[in-house]
Image (cartoon, rainbow, N blue to C red):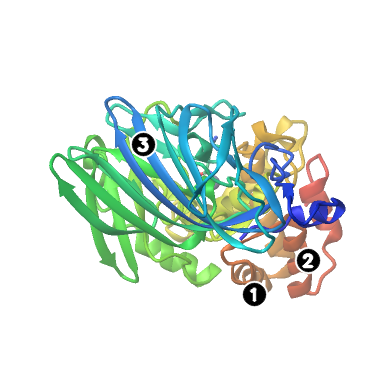
Amino acid sequence: MKRSLALAAAALLTVSASSGAPGDPSGGDPYFPGQGNGGYDAGHYDLVLDYSPSSNVLNGIATIKARTTQELSRFNLDLTADLDVSKVTVNDAPAAFSQGRTELVVTPTAALASGRAFTIVVEYQGRPKHVVDPDGSRGGWIRTSDGVFNANEPQGAMTWYPGNHHMTDKATYRFTVTVPSTRMAVANGDLTSRKTTGDRTTYVWDVKEPMAGYLATVTVGKFKLTDTRIGKYRTIVAVDPKLADEAVNLAERHAPVLDYFASLFGPYPFSSTGAIVDHAPNVGYALETQSRPIYDEVPSEWLLAHELAHQWFGDSVTPSRWQHIWLNEGFATYADWLWQDKIGERGLQTSFDTAYAIPAKDAFWKTPTADPGGPAALFHDRVYNRGAMTLHVLRSKVGDTAFFQILRTWTAEHKYGNADTRAFIALSERISGHDLSDFFADWLFKPGKPAL
Ligand code: ARG
Ligand code: ZN
């Protein structure tokens, strides 16, 4: 389920029918050139993992169902060299492979025809290490006192499983994770089985809706797990016992937020919801892991709303390039403003006015929202608050009816897919019937504080 970046490149290459051509080692994203790979499109990951928190040893077997998008002699998967690959097969036949710092290069015995389904199996083991993101924060496999806090935006997925880790290649997942029975493994989607053999327990989690790799999580630790249907939602909440006192009613807090957002943005896109709350003093952020956000502390109302809003904006509809991150963060911020307004915590206009009051000479206004300048700026205030302000001003220009029609059409037309800023502008103009080019130029593309 990846937009075929490789097609144009493949057309330019003259390949002999028998040998094919190597897949592009890059997904083509200027912010993270090494992320993602061309030549194939992953459809399903079946990850069988065995993890021991005390030694940090991970054993993995990744079975990836994919389809070629060109005649393919060789292809890459993203995986850090902290993990040792011991065996790779392609369609059950042993394949040659080599490992670079963040790339696993696989050469099947014979080139694969274009447009063909194939299966890759990678066996690997090692002690995963977290990555340090360009903004200085930790990501990926982040060890805690009792396991691992696993958050992968933007580039952590390569620290624990091989894959096509650009967000345009979404896939379904099954995680089968074995841990010591004193611990639990909590992932995205639906818990479908839990079995104890001896002193180890195996958890199976199924993700039936397409998911980008940066939204996957397999978090391990001591947890108190509740799995209940509340209103329309299967709500699975895992709370670190250290934080249990503050987490009262956490499961019950989900349905009202989801119902409100569903009334504004369209139906909730996933088969279950919930939260993973894991005490992790070295993390410092929460993440909208698909269907089940992960928090390093018990979330406040605005943070809970923020991560749940991302399920529509970010998880179901995902940007096609990292530079369009305001489509995630600006939208989730506007949604958390709406929720704070709804519950009487802070008025919407106050949220806007407070953000807009930043003086024009402040660095906040320097960088345009639609391209915050590079990977270190992905999660800067400018993206969140200027993005949210953009939506608020858009709403005042087109009116409430058209505004929410735009948001609902956005989530419906791009459900489980990817989209970019241009598509949002075109949709806004189509639905409102207004020429919005000056407005969007001021708010998204030009540096400087836009006049109201
Ligand atoms: N998307 C997350 C949120 O807004 C933030 C992730 C921060 N990640 C990072 N590497 N700094 O909730
Ligand atoms: Zn966010």
Question: Disc 2 to disc 1, how far (Cα)?
Answer: 17 Å
Residue marked by disc 2: 426
Residue marked by disc 3: 59
Left or right: 421 with respect to 104? right
Element assignment for label 3: strand
Asked if residue 200 is positioned above or below residue 258 in the image, the reply reads above
Asked if residue 257 is positioned above or below residue 95 in the image, the reply reads below
Q: Single out the mark in the foreground, 2 or 3.
A: 3
- Residue type pointed to by label 3: Asn
Q: Is residue 38 among the parts visible in the rendering?
A: no
Which quarter of the figure has residue 424? bottom right
Quick one: 451 or 43, which is closer to the camera?
Answer: 43
Residue marked by disc 1: 401
- Residue type pointed to by label 2: Ala
Asked if residue 230 is positioned above or below residue 336 in the image, the reply reads below
Q: Would the CB of label 1 be found within 8 Å of ligand 2?
A: no
